Image (cartoon, rainbow, N blue to C red):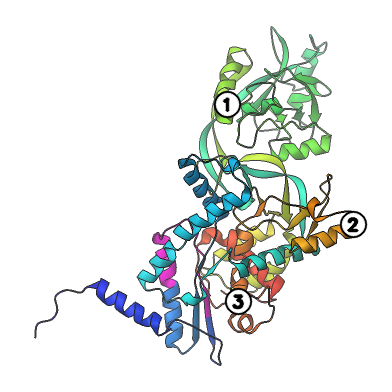
Amino acid sequence: MELASKYDPKEVEGKWYQYWLDHKLFSSKPDGREPYTIVIPPPNVTGVLHMGHMLNNTIQDILVRRARMEGKNALWVPGTDHASIATEAKVVKKLAGEGIKKRDLTREQFLEHAWDWTHEHGGIILKQLRRLGASCDWDRTAFTMDEKRSESVIKVFVDLYNKGLIYRGLRMVNWDPKALTALSTEEVIYKEEQSHLFHLKYYVADLKALDNEEALKAEGNIIHKDEKGYYAVVATTRPETIMGDTAMCINPKDPKNQWLKGKKVIVPLVNRVIPVIEDRYVDIEFGTGCLKVTPAHDTNDYMLGKTHNLETIDIFNADGTISEQSPLYVGMDRMDCRKQIAKDLQEAGLMEKIEDYVNKVGYSERNPDTAIEPRLSLQWFLKMKHFADIALPPVMNDELKFYPTKYKNTYKNWLENIQDWCISRQLWWGHRIPAYYYNENDDYVVAETREEALKLAQQKDPKVTDADLRQDEDALDTWFSSWLWPISLFDGINKPGNEEIKYYYPTSDLVTGPDIIFFWVARMIMAGYEYIGDMTGT
């Protein structure tokens, strides 16, 4: 008997997959059987399947099909993530190709374009998964910005604000000059780069001679001088920030720089006279032991500035160009400025030397070619210590298990060193922050709806009208919706204790990449304990 020599996957796979769908073989409803639940890590609407997705989803499909064969009520829930930064960038690029600039549109007009783009491209990955035979319950397909998920996000924001866990504050943040938005610490990718260490001359102001120069040298002081006078040497990888210098700092215990105590120095090229301050923060062994302090453009410098009451001069615009607060190079891109200022410093005799230097530079996780700029900015933050305290013990006690187990230590290290989460983004695509300002002082209330906000504002000031309300322009970090994913899929935020959340949650297994343990996995565990009081799965 002659066997068929050819197998036609198009005919066979398409036919049987459609049969499975028509007969609802992947659908699930609560019943008396043991539940087995997996939620798909929602891929970005901007993307298409890659090999990582393939491995991830194949493992999930194997697990869920095995559970069905064991007689369990197996459910695999699909969905997509709105991906604020990536999607907005795609829409901005598309509009630019049509000769339209975002700044020329209203928020509503821009969002129309964003929704059009999402409807056109957002389902590509899900269609690919169908073609591959993924056994998801497609009737449950969710989107992080659909009605149920959006209501859940806003409700949680208001709840956490009312609990005192969300606050608005002026802090140093990681700024993406390309996307024009703040990022959380976890969205910064550090890369080792071959760079330079620029040694700059900061001349001592109003000092022509040191009466006790020889005695100071005998005590270990390293004193620099030339025909122009005495000077200190500051080593920096970022000479383009000197326009924002407001102090020079030395360690009070550093023997080589004792001669600078109480002095003032002149910022090279800028000619601003700044004080020499003393703080043990300065590493005696690094460079010359003299640190330029630029409070607006470095996290540690900002803390020094607060401690020593220094002026803060922001010399960068949001897009990374030099601002009008700078006396030099206004309008120039920061990277171009670095090259130009190095050249100008050398020509002016203000560069002691340039050394090759390897350092780590932070880049935007969403814009890998864009170096992050530390920036002082008014943003919304979520206090994370409370969440770390409730999410660490279950993992350490093996109530919730990581495979491989080595990631248990990765999780532990992050939670033990956790920082407050910057949750606001200067974007239009996303869940808009439900804060409403009602006067010129930017006093605000937080509420789920504009109507509720008006009532709250009128309790503080009876004269407030609806016309006085201005909703915050920022959107929430995409992960602020994703961390609710396994709960919001079953409407557990809007309808606590409903039949589905009690049956399907906690989920049975989570298959994902180790790169999002911080972004997603840990935060889902936090949300689970905060709102359900149980773990999210293994």
Q: Residue furthest bottom?
A: 32
Amino acid type indicated by mark 3: Phe
Residue 423 left/right relative to 521: right
Say which residue label 2 marks. 460
**Figure quadrant of the N terminus:** bottom left
Q: Are marks 1 and 2 in contact (CB under 8 Å)?
A: no
- Which stretch is magenta? 37-59
Q: Secondary structure at mark 3?
A: loop
Counting residues from the N terminus, which is met first, the one under dot 3 or under dot 2?
A: 2
Q: Position of residue 279 (x, y in %)?
A: 79, 35
Residue 103 on image: x %, y %: 60, 41
Sequence-wise, the earlier of marks 1 and 2 is 1
Please give the residue where the numbered disc 3 appears in the rendered image. Answer: 490
Between 525 and 498, the one lying in front of the other is: 498
Q: CA distance from mark 1 to mark 2?
A: 50 Å
Tell me the distance, in whole angstroms, between the alpha carbons under discs 3 and 1: 52 Å
Of residues 274 and 95, the one nearer the viewer is 95
Residue shown at the point (63%, 80%) measured from the top left: 501
Is residue 218 visible in the rendered image? The answer is: no
Q: What amino acid is found at the position of numbered circle 2 in the picture?
A: Lys
Crowdedness of circle 1 by 10 Å Cα count: few (<14), some, many (20+)? Answer: some
Camera-side mark, 3 or 2 = 2
Q: Nearer the viewer, residue 311 or 385?
A: 311
**Residue 81 seen from this side:** yes
Secondary structure beneath dot 2 equals helix
Q: Is residue 268 magenta?
A: no
Point out the image quarter for the C terminus.
Answer: bottom right
- Cα separation between marks 3 and 2: 37 Å
Q: Is residue 40 a member of the stretch shown in magenta?
A: yes
Sequence-first disc among 3 and 1: 1
Residue labelled with disc 1: 338
